[in-house]
Structures are given as structure tokens and as C-alpha cells.
Image (tube, helix red, strand yellow):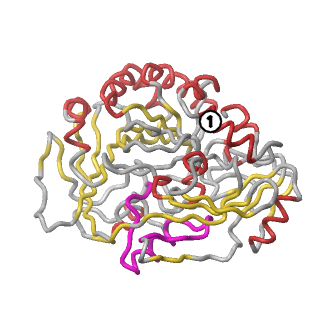
Amino acid sequence: MPQTNWAGNVAFGAARMLRPESVAELRRQVAGNPVVRALGSGHSFSPVADTTGALISLDDLPRTVRIDAGTRTVTATAAIRYAELAARLDAGGYALPNLASLPHISVAGACATGTHGSGDANRCLASAVSALEMVTADGELVTVRRETDAEFPAMVTALGTLGIVTSVTLDLVPAFTLRQWVYQDLPRRRLAAHFDEIFASGYSVSVFTDWRPPSTCTVWRKQLADGTGAPPRRWLDARLADAPVNPVPGMAAAHTTAQQGVPGPWHERLPHFRAGYTPSSGDELQSEYLVPRARAVDALAALEPIAGRIASVLRISEIRTIAGDDLWLSPCYQRDSAGFHFTWHRDTAAVVPVLAAIEERLAPFAARPHWGKLFTMAPADVRSRYPRLPDFERVAARLDPAGRFGNDFTGRYL
């Protein structure tokens, strides 16, 4: 059992680490420990999964994947990674609407923190959840459903504070094929002038920049393989890459999903990184802030004056768009959003002052930080940006009155 998160920047303070092999054993462990937290794949960079009590990994629970063709849903073990689930779905002719940039993360953990992919019409990953099975504070096993439970929007993205999820049911779509094209050296001024056009140019689009002179970007366009020919060699003053690239400077292109228009299944093109390789750079920290989609260009301009400070501790930055949803603690709650993501060198002392500067520049846009990434925003500021937080607190008080599933992080921000 790891004693740190994936990046090594969070040392778990758990008094004990537990690995139940059945749901019945998990129920006994929850009921028998006054403080418990579930550990997913450990990919969060914030201490959202930490605890001073019992940290419970669900990795030893039996793996189950049940596809229901009638409802076009899949019910899967909460700890399953997206890479494994996606391959099983594709083999059956199904797909999830979207995936995150890396497929190594657990389904339940990603949904609990509001993790997302990209695409103007694509919502966060948790939006695909139609039912949850979870163990509540008294050790009971309950199932909640989108169609029948009014409090369901509180439970999907709940930061692990309402119970330990044992299985998730997800909406499916028919399997589809994508092509991925990469354009390099897009002037950042062109990104600002053609933001909507750029992000409407594919099923899923990401823009990468290092915030350094000469202020250029790389655009990753993931497009449906609909039989159209090769794209133009030049587009908005950017050039089509003539070889595969890695979005993280200095990292091997072999770690990334296939590019240059090679068609492939959805789950091998939507992520940036291949499941069999270390995701991203490995030696890093990450942050992300989500602003209203309609204010994205203004937010981009607001960050320009501190581009040098950002670049001094940055590996790479990614900009994505995400459709709004109705999940109470989702960073995209009731607003289409643009996400400004930062992959940092692993130097917390140097990164934290830059985070504070970014948050100051993005404050006029009511930026919401990704729950699983690093941020320094005051708890009151974070809370003020979630209009349903009082309703969420009432649900939490009823389901977990003793705070069995809480920790210092959720205590501060919720």
C-alpha cells in the first residue's frame, strides 16, 4: 500500500491502511473505525484523500463490469481504472462520452473530484453516472439513482464525504473512432482571436502553452473519423506537426496516444497518454482553475502579465473547455467552463506563490479550483462559488453526522 500519493507530494497520515476483499468486509471496516477515507488511484495532488484514521483501498474488491444493453449502461467496480473499463466497453461496442487526459485514474475517484476531459459539448466524467452503490457511515449498503433520488446531484461529486462508493453505473454511447491531429506554433494572440473556432474544431480539443516567449501554443484536435481527408498543413498560422509529439517538453512521444490522423478507438485517442506508460511527466505537481466559458479569453488576457512567473516553475499548461452540469460540487456546476491547467516542476515552495498570483488574476472570473489539484484559495472564497453548498452540507449532516468520512481538507472547504 503506498504511503504517499502518486506524485509523492502528499504523505498520508493514516493510522492504518485497509484493503477489504469483499463489500461485507468493507462494511465492517467502515462501521468499526471512527474516521475513514477511500483511496482511489492516488492521483490527486491535493490532500483530498488523506486521513488520520483508516485509509481504505478498494483495489482488492472483485472486479466486475456488467453491461446492460437495454438501458445502455455499465455497472462497474468503483476502483476500476478507466483504461481497463474502456477496453471492456469497446470490445462490447460501447463507449463513454469522454475521458480525461490520462486513463490511469479510478472511475470513482475521478467522479468524486469532478475530473473532466475536453470538448464544448462534453461534460465532466461524473455526468455519466446514473447510479451509485455506497457504504454509508453506519455500515449500510445503499444504492442511489439519478431518476429517483432528489439528492443524487450531491452524491456523485462529493469528495468522498458521504460514503465509500463500491460501484458506479455509467451511461454509454455507441463506440466511435477518432483521429488526432497536432498543430504547432500557434501564436497565442491567434488563440485569443479565434478561441471559439479552435475549440469547436474537434470532438475534443486541447491547447498547450509554456507561457514563454515567443508566446506560441500547440493544439491537439481529436476529431471523429468521418472519412474526411487530411487537414491543411497550415491553420491559423500554425503548422501541422510532421511527427508525433508529447505535450510535456522533454518527454518521449512514445508515451502519448497515436497522432497524425491515424484512426483508432475512442479510448486510445481521447486520453493524451497511453495506459502502459507513466502518465504526464511523473515528477510534477498540478493545478487547475475553471472559469466561465464565456470569459475564457478575458481570463487568458488576465494571466498574460504574469506569464514569466508562471513559466519559471512550469512544465506545461493546458487549456480545455467543458460543458456545464448539475452536480452540486462540480467545478462546472451550471456553467460551461474553460479549464486552465498547469503542470509544475515538483517544487512546492516555488509553486505556491505562483498559485496565489494566478488566483488573484482569476478572482474576477469566480474561478473554481479542481478539488484534486493544488490551490491556495481561502476556504470562504471557494465556498462562495458553490451556490448549492448549503444544501450539500444538510445532506452530509444527515448521512454522516459524526463526520466519519471527513478530513482536514474537506473540513476547511466544505
Side of 150 where 259 appears, left or right: left
The span picked out in magenta is 72-100
The vertical placement of 148 against 82, above or below, is above
Q: What's the residue at 30%, 49% (across, down)?
A: 205
Q: Residue 366 location in percent, x, y?
A: 47, 25
**Picture quadrant where residue 361 is located:** top left
Task: Kindly identify which residue carries mark 1.
Answer: 391
* Number of other residues with Cα within 10 Å of mark 1, as a class: few under 14, some 14 to 19, many 20 or more: few
Q: Nearer the viewer, residue 378 or 2?
A: 378
The quadrant of the image that shows the C terminus is: top right
Q: Residue 69 versus residue 102: which sits nearer the camera?
A: 69
Q: Residue at x 38, y 19 (%)?
A: 305
Q: Residue at the location (30% across, 71% down)?
A: 264
* Magenta residue check for 85: yes
Percent of width and height locating residue 99: 42, 58
Which amino acid type corresponds to the residue marked 1 in the rendered image?
A: Asp
SS for tag 1?
helix
